[in-house]
């Protein structure tokens, strides 16, 4: 399905600022992280772009800990996510990951999906039960959720990527981001990709995201195969340093 942007009154996802601008014009030192402020983030973010994929994956793991510690959204999470989305098209994102013939781009998309999940309807709905006002306008989480249309615009070109891991990671990120009401027009298109994930993916967490999303959007899906699910379902920052170890 192709969505026309020709109508002047039609909503349009905002474009991302260039990643170089995000890096240079963000006052990282003023932004909260779980370990103080984000003054070290420019150096970490820069290490996502060298030609050595080991350095890239280490940097991505470090980034997840700095701005997503214990699956929490901090002040520094939003600009970091915008930066990561902005480098998806960078040549360095095509570097193959260590010990796997998978582009780093897939890991970047998975990181975005996991971060978006931390601010998803499911997670914030649970949190609001214990912390009323958690989603009030202007709060850190509410402001991050406002970025979902912008992030989706960066993710969506990879829904039909030639590499299946990149494609699947983009689908999962897109499904989570499309909870935003402005993105409702994309859901029928995304549902097709979600069904393909159910049909072909061997990744059970991704299959759960696809299934739950289709059910939430009113689609009938086959009964799931039995599995053991933790209380928080899918969503941990899974691209840790363990990815760098050889598969023994």
Image (cartoon, rainbow, N blue to C red):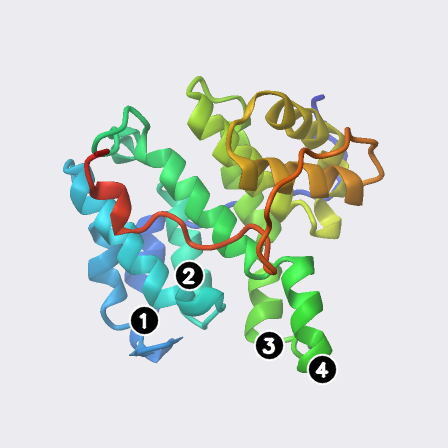
Q: Earlier in the sequence, mark 2 or mark 1?
A: 1
In the rendered view, would you say 233 is above or below 221? below
Say which of 50 and 9 sits in front.
50
Question: Which residue matches tag 1?
Answer: 28
Visible residue check, residue 170: yes
As measured in the structure, the alpha-carbon distance from the residue carrying label 3 to the one carrying label 4 is: 12 Å
Q: Are marks 1 and 4 in contact (CB under 8 Å)?
A: no
Q: Residue 134: where, in percent of width, then height? A: 65, 77
Say which of 101 and 94 sits in front.
101
As measured in the structure, the alpha-carbon distance from the residue carrying label 3 to the one carrying label 1 is: 18 Å
Q: Are marks 2 and 1 in contact (CB under 8 Å)?
A: yes
* Quarter residue 120 falls in: bottom right
Dot 2 alpha-carbon crowd within 10 angstroms: few under 14, some 14 to 19, many 20 or more: many
Question: Which residue matches tag 2?
Answer: 79
As measured in the structure, the alpha-carbon distance from the residue carrying label 4 to the one carrying label 2 is: 26 Å
Q: Earlier in the sequence, mark 3 or mark 2?
A: 2
Question: Which residue matches tag 4?
Answer: 132
């Amino acid at each position: 399905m192709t969505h026309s942007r020709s109508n002047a009154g039609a909503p349009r996802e905002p474009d991302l600022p260039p990643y170089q601008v995000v890096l240079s014009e963000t006052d990282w030192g003023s932004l909260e992280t779980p370990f103080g402020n984000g003054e070290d983030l420019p150096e970490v973010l820069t290490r996502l772009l060298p030609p050595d994929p080991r350095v890239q994956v280490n940097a991505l793991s470090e980034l997840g800990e700095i701005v997503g510690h214990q699956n929490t959204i901090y002040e520094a999470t939003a600009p970091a996510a915008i930066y990561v989305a902005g480098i998806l098209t960078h040549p360095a994102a095509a570097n193959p990951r260590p010990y796997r013939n998978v582009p780093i781009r897939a890991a970047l998309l998975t990181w975005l999906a996991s971060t978006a999940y931390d601010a998803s309807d499911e997670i914030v709905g649970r949190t609001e039960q214990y912390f009323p006002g958690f989603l009030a306008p202007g709060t850190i989480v509410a402001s991050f959720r406002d970025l979902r249309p912008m992030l989706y615009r960066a993710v969506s070109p990879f829904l039909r990527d030639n590499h299946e891991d990149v494609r699947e990671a983009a689908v999962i990120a897109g499904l989570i981001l499309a909870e935003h009401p402005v993105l409702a027009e994309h859901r029928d298109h995304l549902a097709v990709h979600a069904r393909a994930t159910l049909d072909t993916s061997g990744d059970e967490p991704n299959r759960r995201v696809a299934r739950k999303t289709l059910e939430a959007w009113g689609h009938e899906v086959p009964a799931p195969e039995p599995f053991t699910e933790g209380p928080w379902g899918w969503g941990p920052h899974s691209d840790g340093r363990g990815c760098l170890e050889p598969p023994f």
